[in-house]
Image (cartoon, rainbow, N blue to C red):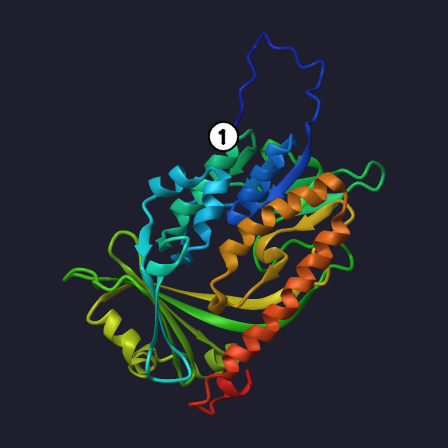
Amino acid sequence: MYERQSGLVMIPANATTAEPTPVRVHDVAVLGGGPAGSVTALELARRGRDVVLLERTRFDGPRFGETLPPEINPLLRRLGAWDAFLACGPLESPGTISAWGSPVPDETDFVANRHGNGWHVERNAFDAALCELAASEGVRVLVGTAVSSCRRDAADGTWTVTTANAKDGPVRARFVVDATGRNGVRLDETDGRVVEDTLVAVFLQFAHDDGPPKDLRTLVEAAADGWWYCAPLPGGRTIAAFFVEPNFYVEQGVGLGEQLRGAPLTCARVGRARLVRSDIVHVSSSIRTRVAGDGWAAAGDAAASYDPLSGYGITKALQNASAIADAIARGDLDSYNDNAHHAFAPYVRQKRAYYAMERRWNTPFWQNRR
């Protein structure tokens, strides 16, 4: 289903090369095959646009587990992605546990949620399923295709996207959607980001030789120097992530044993599990100064990245895909830009209020967020 970048193409001896093949100019090039990119490409294709999607990976590298809230269910059904989603083997999430502002945990059960339960997903499988859905609707999908540069021709306004696979030639399009994540691709001279907060996430993946924990709820727990997220993964493993100040991580490092002991609920969930993988990721809470401009728009985290505490990233990406496609179709990118900024402002207020609830410690992490 995907067009995979090939090696040397052999020309038959009797072939003629007198007339060069004209370069295909797509209506839209979407950079990035995560949920934001795939669903935006899907929505554009359903509106009759000729779309090409470029994804630098083959969905086989390190991607971290994710917990999806119940609100994702109607979005997946509307997209026609429900069967493909279930086929990628998600694990039901029956609720959440939050020890925030108090050592006594607050428990939320999804049994009364009108959308049903939430889900724990393996991101490679989930992202690949959405990308395959886009391909089935006519999107030209190029995996294993890293973008090297993206520039616009001043004469005709078309974009030339150069990839690391130079032998296959550049990709051309009349419009570009940047869905490459929190850092994004610079598409405009005035392009920049307003950073609300920056965290370092230490991701740990555990295997359970004696069987996985029976509690499938997502756990969030505040600690002296940051906060923990812990959730099961499909396949029986557990993911735990510790979010900490970048300066604290650089200057003092993170003693994971000590930090786990300071989070008794997370420590009990991990138990005597065996650590099998660890990764460090910088996680910003920020918004682009403009999320759309002349001939381009940003989607998902490339437009506005929210604190992982919100649990809103993928839901936001799926919700906004239709808005991006509609804005491109109408030629009304200013409204899309304004709406993104209007949505970010109340998020910032809510985020600050939530961090201000935790007053058990006067460490730099919490002082900086009050």
Q: Is residue 4 visible?
A: no
Residue 42 screen position, x and y as percent: 56, 38
User: Residue lying farthest left?
Assistant: 210
The secondary element bearing badge 1 is classed as helix
Which residue occupies 57% across, 41% down? 54
- The amino acid marked with disc number 1 is Ser
Q: Residue furthest top?
A: 14
Q: Position of residue 101 (x, y in %)?
A: 42, 83
The residue where tag 1 is placed is 136
**Few, some or many residues within 10 Å of mark 1 (<14, 14–19, 20+):** some
Asked whether, in this view, residue 170 is left or right of residue 5, the answer is right
- 302 with respect to 275 (left or right): right
Q: Quadrant of the C terminus?
A: bottom right
In the rendered image, residue 93, in percent from the top left (x then y), is placed at 33, 58
221 shown above or below 187: below
Which residue sits at x=16%, y=61%?
209
The foreground one among 318 and 245 is 318
Q: Residue at x 71, y 13 (%)?
A: 18
Q: Is residue 218 left or right of residue 280?
A: left
Determine the residue positioned at 51% across, 78% down.
354
- The picture quadrant where one finds residue 351 is bottom right
- In the rendered structure, the answer to whether residue 145 lies left or right of residue 154 reads left
Q: In the image, residue 361 lies at what x, y percent?
A: 43, 90
